[in-house]
Amino acid sequence: MLDPMRLRLAGLILALILVGACGRNVTLYKQALKEYKRGEYETALKTNVRSLQKKPSYAPSQRLIKKTFAKAIEDREEKIRLIQAAAQDDMWDQLVLEYAALVELQNSIQPVNPLPDHDTGEPYQFELQDFQAKLTESQANAAEFHYNRGLVLAADQDSPDSQKAAAREFRTALDFVPGYRDASARLGAAKGLSVKRVAILPFEDKSGTQGQFGSMIDLLTATIIGKLIQDKVISEYLEVVTRDQISALLAEQLLSAPENADSANPAALGGLLDVHEIMTGKIILVNLVPPRTSYVDIKETKNIVTGQESYFTKKGKEKKRDVRADVSCVYRRYTKTTSVNIIASFSLIEVLTGKIKLPEIVSADYSWSDTWGRVMSGDERALTEATASFCLKDEPFPPSDVGMVHIALDNLSNDIVTAVRNYIR
């Protein structure tokens, strides 16, 4: 036989749970009502469903969800009518989004459909439409539209840019309908034809530093080529002609056609190298700030035992005790800094038209800083363990000027590669 006390306790707990659930149900209803009045019908619908899941028989929520569901459907259908009337190029893309939203709307009420109607006691069935069929139809039409646009672009086989755009269209068609027709094969073909051959010519040194930082030109050019080749995104669209290949191709072309030996402009050079684009650039400025040292004096104070003194207890016995006092020490905190800033310009030139495709000015820095300390005056016992160690540190020295410039050049090459990656996407 159950303990009456336990039964009462269980009943009380159950009552509290029911009260809590009812309270949460009302809160959700009020939230849904506010969202409905603001015209946020889809949000209100989801909140309303949560309210009815707490208490399916709650009359205010039942009345609200019928209005909310109808309004949400009506809004989406009105958007569809406007999209169809405008008949823009991306009509099917837009319709896919709208029908997908309608499918989701109808799915969202399934947890409370049918609804035990509070007024009649009969199960209330929401009126559902076959939006999935219209979604499938729109996806097929969108895939066909992008597939056909890809065919038009892919017809220009001499233009890597057209092939790149065609590849995007075929990929979009496959996003709408996986395995659509032969879009996958055409995507692969277009990607292959979209690869551009690019020659990276040695940058010019216009900084006026007269080689005092080593061969900046060779280092920067080689670093850019190496990073372009290793970049997975870039290598998908660009075939970089290496410096050795450039030298070999030029030697071969000039040997067989010496009349082209004076071809110094990028377009003529691009023709000799059989490339689509050429990168040229200049190092404009190398600003090296010599090492500078600054300092600040800092005082530390500590209460320590400085000795002992004698004293007598109440019983007249002599004893000793520690004597404490505040002691201070001043140490000098030195900071040494140096930096270098490099500014360069570069551009990608389309060989066929001579058009400058990517004019950019980039700037890169490298800064070095370090600190150390020295005791200036006072009692060193006042210093913390960390400060005492800091004051024993050897004076640091920065990297060499050449080393700092090379680090800045590496940072500069990163910026150039990033610009190229953004350009080809």
Image (cartoon, rainbow, N blue to C red):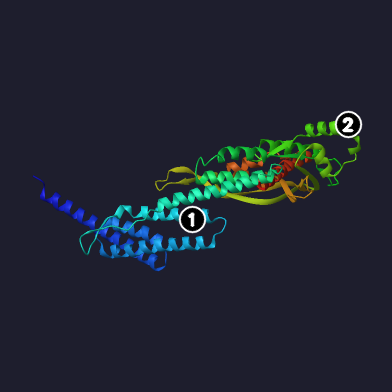
**Can you tell which of label 1 and label 2 is closer to the viewer?**
1
Residue type marked 2: Leu
- Nearer to me, 259 or 361: 259
Q: Is residue 397 left or right of residue 265?
A: left
Q: Check if mark 1's residue and mark 2's residue have beta carbons within 8 Å.
A: no
Separation of residues labelled 1 and 2 (CA atoms): 61 Å
Helix, strand or loop status at disc 2:
helix
Q: Name the residue under label 1.
A: 95
Provide residue 350's location: percent of width, then percent of height: 76, 46
* Residue at the spot 50% in from the left edge and 63% down from the top edge: 82
What numbered label is drawn on residue 134?
none
* Residue at the spot 50% in from the left edge and 42% down from the top edge: 178
Residue type marked 1: Leu
Crowd around label 1: few <14 · some 14–19 · many ≥20 (10 Å): many
Q: Name the residue under label 2.
A: 255
Provide residue 132's location: percent of width, then percent of height: 41, 51
Can residue 62 be seen here? The reply is yes
Residue 270's place in the image compared with 325, above or below, is above
Q: In this view, does 318 lie to the left or right of 358?
A: left
- Nearer to me, 113 or 397: 113
Does label 1 or label 2 sit earlier along the sequence? Answer: 1
Q: Is residue 33 left or right of residue 149?
A: left
Helix, strand or loop status at disc 1:
helix
* Residue at the spot 46% in from the left edge and 50% down from the top edge: 137
Provide residue 421's location: percent of width, then percent of height: 66, 44
